[in-house]
Image (spheres, rainbow, N blue to C red):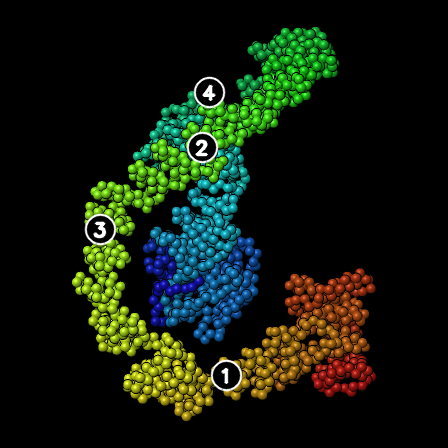
């Protein structure tokens, strides 16, 4: 992003007039500026001032100058402005949406402290900071403010994140605090997250980074948790001042920070994942930036200054014009502003995820917007300003977008359709489909409001060409799948998504009801169909009829109007719906019944009163009746009973209307009792349930209210006595018996004996029940009851009576069943056979009479045959073994496969009778192979051959004939049959027969005889393709002889000999046909030729008329002239086109010229009016006299041309003088110059030019010079010679120019160049003026310098008295001695200049050795930059102590950065450690790095520890002599010295087995310094040493502590550390937590195992060993007395008794430890131990006698 200054909104003043605050409105239309006068100016988005108003103090008695405005912010709706003031108040002004509205204070918030900053994030209240450190929030709705959090430090700045859900506050103590109103799932921490190095007045929360800056001229970028991730340091820039204010772009991808005269721009680089500084915007005299505000769409930045200026900047990466209709402004990587150039409207397209927008396109009739990022897709509707961003993987740009639906974008990619609703940031739904025609997809999103439905989103699409899937996009499941038997070519849902219309390829219109999942066909031959907008009315066209369904719930009710044309459109505007019909020349509108349409809309909206009002205005018709029915149903469901009553009354349903009248009365009564509309009363609900035939529901409603009688009465009124009795029985009603009696009596009275019998049966009175069933004529029911009861079965009288009744009533099967149960099998079988219940009969026979089964099966088959159930009879005949009957049944039932199966099982003699029938069947159905098989089996192959012949299957017939007949017989048969076919005129059939027996020639001959040449040619083409062309020619000639010319033409053209056809027509004098053929087959050229020949044959005027007819007269004349038929051409031209005569003369002349007949050609040229051509002819043939003669006679203007021609010829002949004379006669001296130039005779050319055209002399001279210059070395020689000539002739100026023209392009010889240029300078000095001489010298000397001739250049400068230039030239040529000498002798004031340049030269060349003699410090710095540290230190040693240690410190810092600590230590060991405070951090860093180094607890590490100890001793002694003596710093280094001495002594002891106990003591003593050394390493070493020495208690405690510390390091906190084991010791608790583990994992695991094992050992206790003081043995301080003992210089343990004191105060040793150390040293002669004793002597003063001490 770059800043481009657009305009100055407010001009700056001469003095300080600070702009205190700026704010842009969220709608981008207003900018507020607060001036030093506390006046708020309002500007529009173009930067024009439109309004202003003054602010007011909290208390008017203090005056208007008692406060300043510290913050401005617009409300999210841009209608209010919040103003924060230092007089402890915030005012909220209502400014309105239009310019000039009255400004009213609508809120004020009084505070306890001054307001320091303020902001108003979107979707949040006002947030502001106070001088007392609090951050508070003000709610404009409640007019109350509350504290968000408090600090103790002045709030200097506020910032919020891009969503406005989180805020940052910067404070005067440098702290930056973060707070979230909503976490948004980031998981980021709240509270103080960073401490900036100075008060962060410039604070910005941009994306995932926090940018802070202030007065230290550094810009720090903090990460999510406050860690510094980037730093921009401008402290070395002397032009930079403090940073005062920051603003980030709305997308969070750019930050601008203001300072003095400058705006620094930083852009987020997503690919590198870091901030990058862009080009800084610097404006001189702008002064300090005091306020910044970024427009909410990211396109503008406004800056306020200390002097009261307000500057407007354009912020964009780039701009582009799209289709000359839209301007696209990329204000950030992830934000684009799209502006409609016509309307001026703008849309801000932004990636919410911060991705870079690659490209933006505007599609769909310039309404819809599509943008791509690497991971998302951006979509938008420019009309409604709804934008969406959805995750979208890069698919290579293969998506297809469809914008037919205004609410949803359809994206098709790789067989998947995705839907995106504009304004939603997620995919609405995705389905797999291959059909992307907009007519095959229908999407409906909340297009009409429905009762009880909040979110209605549905889609219908094609799964395949015959299957529609309907999907609920809200719930994401499939509502229905519609399968169809034909291909579907159109579909559309209605606006509520409850109905689907679709049409198939057969133009059948189908309606599908999604709720009931039913499909119905509603129209055939449908050519147009559409839903009427905002209704469920359908308009369609069926041939000549306009069809309208005003109520689609009754698709059979359709209104039809005859129309003449086709429906083209449907328009609904201003309460009127028109169907537009195109009737050919005119368009007619048919207006639909708006009332009926409105009815549907009213019902969908639930406004049933309006629907009734519509219907009452209509006459009763089929459509109206259907609507009344629909409304009655809907109103009943909605319990609008009065409307339902009105509907049934209108429909004439008196019973329902009367019933509802009673229900309404009940509702009215209930309304008075319980309130409401009365429909919730139980009586009303029960009656409505009865009306809906929900009797059980009505019963439940009554029983809920314990109204049993009403429930019983309801059933009795409906004559549902059974249900009434059930209710009475269930509830134990006392009148249940009476009810039963009454019911029985009623049944008997009404003749319902069956129901009465059922009642008796239910009561257990079976005899009475049977009597009633018999009385009712229901013997079957009586039989069922009798057989179900044992006592009735035994009653023979009843059984016989029932059986007789059954037989009488012909209930034979039931009678048989009864006899079977009684055991009378014979009578049962007879009944079954009489009743033709053969299944029961066969089942009975299988068990009782097996011999009867076969006979029964045959009877069963005969019965089925009589019933025409032949297919069912087959199996029974098979069971009965009646094969012939089975075959006949199978054939009659056309079960041919079964017939075949049965026949194949029969004897051949029997089977052959049936194979012929079967074969005929298969032949009739076209299964010729099967028919052939059965014909052959029936021994009838000839019938099979005839079959194949009849159906034209000659090959199959031939194949069969070959197998059954001799070849010659087959041929004779086929040829004979073919000849018969030929005689009958069946030529195609005859052809097939000829072909079948491989006699195509007979077929060809047949067709030739019949003059059917097409078929003849077809066969020749197929069987004799090599003779095809000859055949065509032969036929053509035959036809030509028969004068069938058209047919002959066809065959000529087919034979590719169309010219023969043309000639045929010419021979018959049919020129028009010849012309047609030539034009069709030979093209325009051939047609022209024929027309020409035709005209030529006619001659005279006829020829002219013919050619005019074809428009070919001119072309024919041209053709005749081109073909040398000049006489014909002249005839045509004379008759028809006299204007062409000259052209013909000209062409004739040219023809004669080509023939060499020049005189005749001359005459023709003159006739053609072209004498010049005759002249040129003679010139060309070099007949100069004839040419001169013609020119003089007929074309005087050509005389000069003749002379020029003669001159050219003379030049070619090298007769230059003659040629020059001719040209001068022709007055063409310029040609003479040109010819001389071409011949490189430049002197002659210059001579002629000078004499005859002197004005071109200079131009020619320049051209000559260029020519010479381009020749290289030859050119140089020529220039030098020319210069010498000019010099000799006294033309010094021209000579100088020639010398200067000699350059490296002409010669690479530097000496020649030097001579020429020096000569030019000498001539200028001698003969030209002073100014010219200096000019030439200034020109020549740089050239000499360029070719390395610095001496010559310098000498020339000196000769021209140009001293400074001469010195510069000598220096450029590195002639430093000459330069110094010239400066010293001629211009001493340049001596210092030369020295500075020499020094700079040495620096640039890296010649440090030479630079030492000039500038030692610069030489040392150069060595540092070149990394020559050793050389630098060596040189610095010679320059003194201070210089040496400056570079020693630099080298040490460099080594530390490279992690080469040991070398840094060696450096200070070698050169000493001075007590410079600036070196203290280096010394400490060396100490800490060596303390933390691995593997230092061993004998071999002694050298490193000793070096560190000696360096620190040297430092300590130096500090004693310095002003830092006895300071905390000195004490700190003394402690470091003591620690390093312990480490060195431990390494020395580890080399002697006898001193390992001392080494253990030293390791334990070091624990009291764990506030300095790494604690985990110290406890590990102490624990291991204690374990090795058998001090298991202490080892257990120390190693346990080590394990606790490792866990604390992993967790990053010491809070969970238990210090109880070290309560009464001097081992510190407050220790720094090491950043990393210093002990390896395997050692850690080893310690864990040991600690775990020891913890199980009862002998080991978790306590530290104590001494005689009852104190931990390693503690210097006694717990009981508080006395502090001195540490032993050998072991580190406290010196209690047997003290050995040293000369230096505070230094002592335990005698036992001292003697032990001395003894080991004497015994081992260890150099390390001796070195320790030597060091102790230096450090502690005089060493006691190194012998045993027993005192």
Q: Is residue 1646 left or right of residue 1104?
A: right
Among numbered discs 3 and 2, the one appearing first in the sequence: 2
What element does badge 2 sit on?
helix
Q: Residue at x 21, y 70 (%)?
A: 1226
Whether residue 744 is visible to the viewer of this picture, yes or no, is: no
Residue 226 occupies quadrant: bottom right
Q: Quick one: label 2, few (<14), some, or many (20+) residues within 10 Å?
A: many
| Viewer-nearest of discs 2 and 1 | 2
Q: Residue at x 29, y 78 (%)?
A: 1243
Q: Residue at x 56, y 20 (%)?
A: 715
Residue 299 occupies quadrant: bottom left
Among numbered discs 2 and 1, the one appearing first in the sequence: 2
Front in this rendered view, residue 989 or 1460: 989
Percent position (x, y) of residue 1736? 73, 83
Numbered tag placed on residue 1016 in the rendering:
2
What element does badge 4 sit on?
helix
Q: Quick one: label 4, few (<14), some, or many (20+) residues within 10 Å?
A: few
What element does badge 3 sit on?
helix
* Residue annotated with mark 3: 1140
* Residue annotated with mark 4: 655
Percent position (x, y) of residue 640? 45, 29
Whether residue 1590 is visible to the viewer of this picture, yes or no, is: yes
* Residue annotated with mark 1: 1402
In this picture, is 1630 found above or below 1699?
above
């Amino acid at each position: 992003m770059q800043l481009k200054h657009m305009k100055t909104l407010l001009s700056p003043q001469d003095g300080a007039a600070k702009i205190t605050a700026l704010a842009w409105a969220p709608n981008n239309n207003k900018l507020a500026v607060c001036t030093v006068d506390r006046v708020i100016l309002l500007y529009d988005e173009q930067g024009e001032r439109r309004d202003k108003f003054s602010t007011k103090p909290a208390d008017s008695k203090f005056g208007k100058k008692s406060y300043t405005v510290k913050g401005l912010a617009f409300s999210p709706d841009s209608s209010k402005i919040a103003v924060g003031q230092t007089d402890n108040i915030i005012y909220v002004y209502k400014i309105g949406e239009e310019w000039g509205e009255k400004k009213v204070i609508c809120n004020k918030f009084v505070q306890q402290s001054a307001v320091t900053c303020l902001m108003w994030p979107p979707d949040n209240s006002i947030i502001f900071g106070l001088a007392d450190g609090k951050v508070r929030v003000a709610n404009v709705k409640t007019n109350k403010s509350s504290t968000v959090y408090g600090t103790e430090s002045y709030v200097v700045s506020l910032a919020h994140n891009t969503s406005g859900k989180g805020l940052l506050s910067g404070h005067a103590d440098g702290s930056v605090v973060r707070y979230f109103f909503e976490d948004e799932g980031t998981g980021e921490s709240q509270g103080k997250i960073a401490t900036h190095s100075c008060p962060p007045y410039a604070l910005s929360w941009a994306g995932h980074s926090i940018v802070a800056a202030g007065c230290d001229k550094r810009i720090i970028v903090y990460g999510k948790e406050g860690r510094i991730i980037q730093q921009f340091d401008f402290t070395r820039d002397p032009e930079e001042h403090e940073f005062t204010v920051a603003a980030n772009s709305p997308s969070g991808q750019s930050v601008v920070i203001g300072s003095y005269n400058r705006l620094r721009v930083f852009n987020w680089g997503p690919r590198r994942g870091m901030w990058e500084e862009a080009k800084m915007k610097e404006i001189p005299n702008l002064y300090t930036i005091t306020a910044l505000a970024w427009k909410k769409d990211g396109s503008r930045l406004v800056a306020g200054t200390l002097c009261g200026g307000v500057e407007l900047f354009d912020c964009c990466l780039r701009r582009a014009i799209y289709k000359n209709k839209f301007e696209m402004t990329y204000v950030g990587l992830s934000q684009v502003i799209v502006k409609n150039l016509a309307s001026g409207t703008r849309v801000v397209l932004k990636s919410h995820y911060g991705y870079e927008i690659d490209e933006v396109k505007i599609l769909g009739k310039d309404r819809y917007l599509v943008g791509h990022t690497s991971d998302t897709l951006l979509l938008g509707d420019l009309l409604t300003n709804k934008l969406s961003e959805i995750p979208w993987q890069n698919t290579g740009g293969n998506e297809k977008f469809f914008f037919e639906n205004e609410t949803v974008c359809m994206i098709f990619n790789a067989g998947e359709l995705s839907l995106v609703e504009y304004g939603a940031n997620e995919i609405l739904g995705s389905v797999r489909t291959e059909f992307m025609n907009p007519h095959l997809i229908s999407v409906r999103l909340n297009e009409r409001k429905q009762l009880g439905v909040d979110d209605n989103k549905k889609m219908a699409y094609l799964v395949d060409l015959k299957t529609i899937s309907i999907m609920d996009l809200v719930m994401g499941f499939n509502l229905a799948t519609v399968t169809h038997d034909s291909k579907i070519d159109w579909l559309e849902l209605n606006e509520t998504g409850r109905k689907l219309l679709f049409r198939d390829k057969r133009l059948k219109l189908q309606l599908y009801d999604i709720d009931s999942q039913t499909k119905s066909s509603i129209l055939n031959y449908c050519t147009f169909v559409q839903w009427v907008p905002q209704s469920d009315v359908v308009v369609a066209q069926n041939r000549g009829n306009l069809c309208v369904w005003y109520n689609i719930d009754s698709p059979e009710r359709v209104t039809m109007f005859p129309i003449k044309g086709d429906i083209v459109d449907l328009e609904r505007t201003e309460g009127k719906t028109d169907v537009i019909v195109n009737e050919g020349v005119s368009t007619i509108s048919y207006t639909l019944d708006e009332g009926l349409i409105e009815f549907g809309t009213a019902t969908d909206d639930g406004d049933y009163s309006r629907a009734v009002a519509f219907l009452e205005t209509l006459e009763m018709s089929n459509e109206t009746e259907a609507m009344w029915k629909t409304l009655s149903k809907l109103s009943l469901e909605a319990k609008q009973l009065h409307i339902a009553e009105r509907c049934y009354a209108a429909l004439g349903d008196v019973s329902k209307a009367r019933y509802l009248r009673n229900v309404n009365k009940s509702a009215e009564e209930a309304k008075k009792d319980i309130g409401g509309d009365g429909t919730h009363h139980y009586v009303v609900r029960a009656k409505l349930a009865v009306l809906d035939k929900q009797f059980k529901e009505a019963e439940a409603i009554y029983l809920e209210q314990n109204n049993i009688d009403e429930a019983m009465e309801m059933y009795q009124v409906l004559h549902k006595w059974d249900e009434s009795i059930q209710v009475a029985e269930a509830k134990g009603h006392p009148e249940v018996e009476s009810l039963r009696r009454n019911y029985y009596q009623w049944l008997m009275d009404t003749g319902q004996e069956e129901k009465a019998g059922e009642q008796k049966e239910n009561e257990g009175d079976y005899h009475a029940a049977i009597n009633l069933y018999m009385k009712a004529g229901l013997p079957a029911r009586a039989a069922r009851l009798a057989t179900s009861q044992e006592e009735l079965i035994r009653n023979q009288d009843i059984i016989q009576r029932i059986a007789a009744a059954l037989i009488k009533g012909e209930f034979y099967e039931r009678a048989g069943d009864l006899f079977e149960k009684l055991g009378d099998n014979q009578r049962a079988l007879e009944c079954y056979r009489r009743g033709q219940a053969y299944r029961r009969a066969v089942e009975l026979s299988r068990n009782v009479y097996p011999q009867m089964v076969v006979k029964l099966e045959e009877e069963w088959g005969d019965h089925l045959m009589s019933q025409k159930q032949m297919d069912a009879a087959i199996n029974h005949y098979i069971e009965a073994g009646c094969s012939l009957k089975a075959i006949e049944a199978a054939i009659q039932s056309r079960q041919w496969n079964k017939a075949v199966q049965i026949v194949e099982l029969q004897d051949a003699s029997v089977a052959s009778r049936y194979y012929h029938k079967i074969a005929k069947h298969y032949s009739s159905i076209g299964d010729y192979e099967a028919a052939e098989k059965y014909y052959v089996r029936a021994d009838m192959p000839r019938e099979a051959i005839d079959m194949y012949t009849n159906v034209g299957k000659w090959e199959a017939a031939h194949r069969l004939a070959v197998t059954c007949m001799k070849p010659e017989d087959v041929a004779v048969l086929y040829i004979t049959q073919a000849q018969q076919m030929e005689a009958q005129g069946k030529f195609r059939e005859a052809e097939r027969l000829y072909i079948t027996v491989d006699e195509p020639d007979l077929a060809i001959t047949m067709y030739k005889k019949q003059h059917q040449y097409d078929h003849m040619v077809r066969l020749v083409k197929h069987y004799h393709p090599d003779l095809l062309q000859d055949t065509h020619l032969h036929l053509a000639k035959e036809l030509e002889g028969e004068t069938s010319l058209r047919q002959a033409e066809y065959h000529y053209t087919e034979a590719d000999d169309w010219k023969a056809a043309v000639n045929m027509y010419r021979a018959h004098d049919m020129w028009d046909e010849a012309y047609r053929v030539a034009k069709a087959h030979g093209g325009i050229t051939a047609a022209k030729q024929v027309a020409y020949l035709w005209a030529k044959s006619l001659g005279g005027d006829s020829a002219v008329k013919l050619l005019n007819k074809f428009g070919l007269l001119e072309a024919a004349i041209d053709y005749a002239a081109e073909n040398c038929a000049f006489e014909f051409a002249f005839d045509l031209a004379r008759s028809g086109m006299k204007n062409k005569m000259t052209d013909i003369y000209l062409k004739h002349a040219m023809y004669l010229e080509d023939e060499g007949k020049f005189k005749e050609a001359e005459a023709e040229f003159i006739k053609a009016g072209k004498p010049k051509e005759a002249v040129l002819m003679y010139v060309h043939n070099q007949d100069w006299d004839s040419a001169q003669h013609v020119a003089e006679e007929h074309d005087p203007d050509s005389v000069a041309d003749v002379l020029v021609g003669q001159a050219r010829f003379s030049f070619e002949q090298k007769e230059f003088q003659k040629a020059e004379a001719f040209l001068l006669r022709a007055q063409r001296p310029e040609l003479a110059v040109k010819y001389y130039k071409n011949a490189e005779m430049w002197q002659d050319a210059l001579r002629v030019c000078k004499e005859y055209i002197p004005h071109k002399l200079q131009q020619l001279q320049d051209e000559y010079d260029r020519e010479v210059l381009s020749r290289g070395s030859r050119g140089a020689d020529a220039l030098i010679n020319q210069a010498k000539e000019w010099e000799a002739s006294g033309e010094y100026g021209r000579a100088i120019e020639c010398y200067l023209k000699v350059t490296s392009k002409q010669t690479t010889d530097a000496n020649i160049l030097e001579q020429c240029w020096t000569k030019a300078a000498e001539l200028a000095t001698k003969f030209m003026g002073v100014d010219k001489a200096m000019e030439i010298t200034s020109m020549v000397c740089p050239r000499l310098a360029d070719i390395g001739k610095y001496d010559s250049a310098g000498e020339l400068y000196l000769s021209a008295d140009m001293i400074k230039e001469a010195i510069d030239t000598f220096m450029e040529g590195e002639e430093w001695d000459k330069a110094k000498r010239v400066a010293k002798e001629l211009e001493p004031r340049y001596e210092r200049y030369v020295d500075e340049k020499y020094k700079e030269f040495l620096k640039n060349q890296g010649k440090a050795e030479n630079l030492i003699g000039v500038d030692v410090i610069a030489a040392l710095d150069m060595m540092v930059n070149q990394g020559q540290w050793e050389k630098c230190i060596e040189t610095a040693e010679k320059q003194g102590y201070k210089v040496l240690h400056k570079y020693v410190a630099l080298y040490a810092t460099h080594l530390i950065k490279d992690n080469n600590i040991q070398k840094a230590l060696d450096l200070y060991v070698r050169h000493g450690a001075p007590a410079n405070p600036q070196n203290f951090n280096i010394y400490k860093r060396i100490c800490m790095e060596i303390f933390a180094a691995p593997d230092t607890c061993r004998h071999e590490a002694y050298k490193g520890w000793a070096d560190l100890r000696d360096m620190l001793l040297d430092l300590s002694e130096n500090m004693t002599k310095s002003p830092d003596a006895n300071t905390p710093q000195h004490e700190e280094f003394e402690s470091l010295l003591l620690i390093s001495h312990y480490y060195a002594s431990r390494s020395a002891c580890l080399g002697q087995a006898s001193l390992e106990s001392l080494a253990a003591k030293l390791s334990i003593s070091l624990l009291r310094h764990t506030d300095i050394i790494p604690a985990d390493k110290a406890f590990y070493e102490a624990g291991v040493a204690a374990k090795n020495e058998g001090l298991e208690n202490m080892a257990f405690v120390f190693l346990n502590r080590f394990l606790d510390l490792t866990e604390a390091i992993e967790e990053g906190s010491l809070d969970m550390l238990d210090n109880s084991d070290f309560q009464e010791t001097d081992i510190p608790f407050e220790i720094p937590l090491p950043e990393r583990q210093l002990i390896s994992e395997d050692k850690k695991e080893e310690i864990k195992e040991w600690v775990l094992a020891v913890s199980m050992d009862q002998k080991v206790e978790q306590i530290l060993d104590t001494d005689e003081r009852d104190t931990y043995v390693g503690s210097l301080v006694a717990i009981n007395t508080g006395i502090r003992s001195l540490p032993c210089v050998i072991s580190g343990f406290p010196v209690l008794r047997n003290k050995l004191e040293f000369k230096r105060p505070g230094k002592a040793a335990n005698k036992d430890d001292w003697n032990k150390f001395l003894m080991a040293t004497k015994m081992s002669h260890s150099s390390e131990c001796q070195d320790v004793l030597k060091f102790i002597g230096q450090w502690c003063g005089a060493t006691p006698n190194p012998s045993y001490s027993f005192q």
